[in-house]
Amino acid sequence: MHNITLRVGVLATLLLLSRNSMGAPASQQEVNPNSMTTAELEKAGDEARAQKDYALAINYLRTAVRKDRKNSSLYNKLGIAELQNDQLGDARADFEKAAKYDPKNAEAVNNLGAVDFKEKRYGSAVKYFKKAVALEETRATFHVNLGAAWFSQKKVEHAMLEYVRALELDPEALRASSRAGVAAQIASPEERAQYSYMLAKIYAARGDMEGCLQCLKRAKEDGYRNLGNVYKDQEFAKLRDNPRLQEVVPPPIAK
């Protein structure tokens, strides 16, 4: 069975988008950032982020933007380092600058949504994620994020549409190994169970038995009350006769 982990939790886990340009670990030798070029500072910032030394990354990238004050990509990377360092206000300000200097920077727009999502401002997060999708519709991560925001607003059908589209673009979009997107914020076992069942329906519709079963098991563990709907919901129609599914959710007893 594939290891499929549902990305749910009491708090959102921000797994950010701009993971490019992360090379080998930075040198331990101390270097004066002011003596470095913008390109050197950007590379050093990327390397520091790769090592999860966010404070050091922020130092390099802040020096870089002082040298190149209208570089949208640099502001976006600085915002990511600040967000990873839980400096939400600073992150928002720098993502706003990134979007200002390049209105088509879809990652910066998406990351503004990520800040709102982490602050549980779901309505605003939806607006940013929708705008990011409009800018780059083929980015699966943007659809995952929009789906998570919709789910956090209890708009399950809207969430399902976005997750389905994400899987059309990237079959691994909802698996833990993809490490992309935000996690739906789940306040209770009941909501967690509903989330698991929703994903089970999506996997079932795609014919992904492993994903479906894993999600159904989690829904069952969290006490989902309507597991019997497996034998009613159309998404499960092609899998109902499979003994493995019947083992997780026994068929209804004929009257």
Image (tube, rainbow, N blue to C red):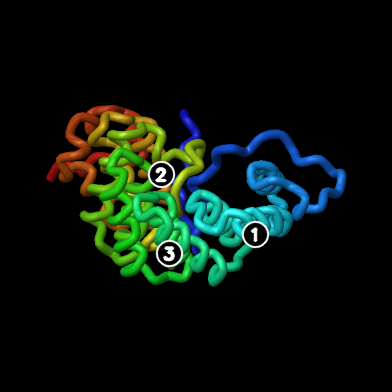
Closest to the camera, between mark 2 and mark 1, is: 1
- Height in image: 187 above or below 243? below
Amino acid type, residue under disc 3 in the picture: Phe
Residue 74 visible in image? yes
Q: Residue furthest left?
A: 255
Query: CA–CA distance between discs 2 and 1?
Result: 47 Å
Query: CA–CA distance between discs 3 and 1?
Result: 24 Å
| Residue 49's disc number | none
Amino acid type, residue under disc 1 in the picture: Arg
- Kind of element beneath mark 1: helix
Observer-nearest of 29 and 169: 29
| Residue 117's disc number | 3
- Kind of element beneath mark 3: helix
Q: Position of residue 44 (x, y in %)?
A: 70, 44
Observer-nearest of 225 and 137: 137
Residue at image mark 2 = 217
Closest to the camera, between mark 3 and mark 1, is: 1
Q: Give the crowd class for mark 3: few <14, some 14-19, many >=20 residues within 10 Å.
A: many
| Residue 62's disc number | 1
Amino acid type, residue under disc 2 in the picture: Lys
Q: Position of residue 79 (x, y in %)?
A: 55, 59
Q: Position of residue 169 (x, y in %)?
A: 31, 34
Quarter occupied by the C terminus:
top left
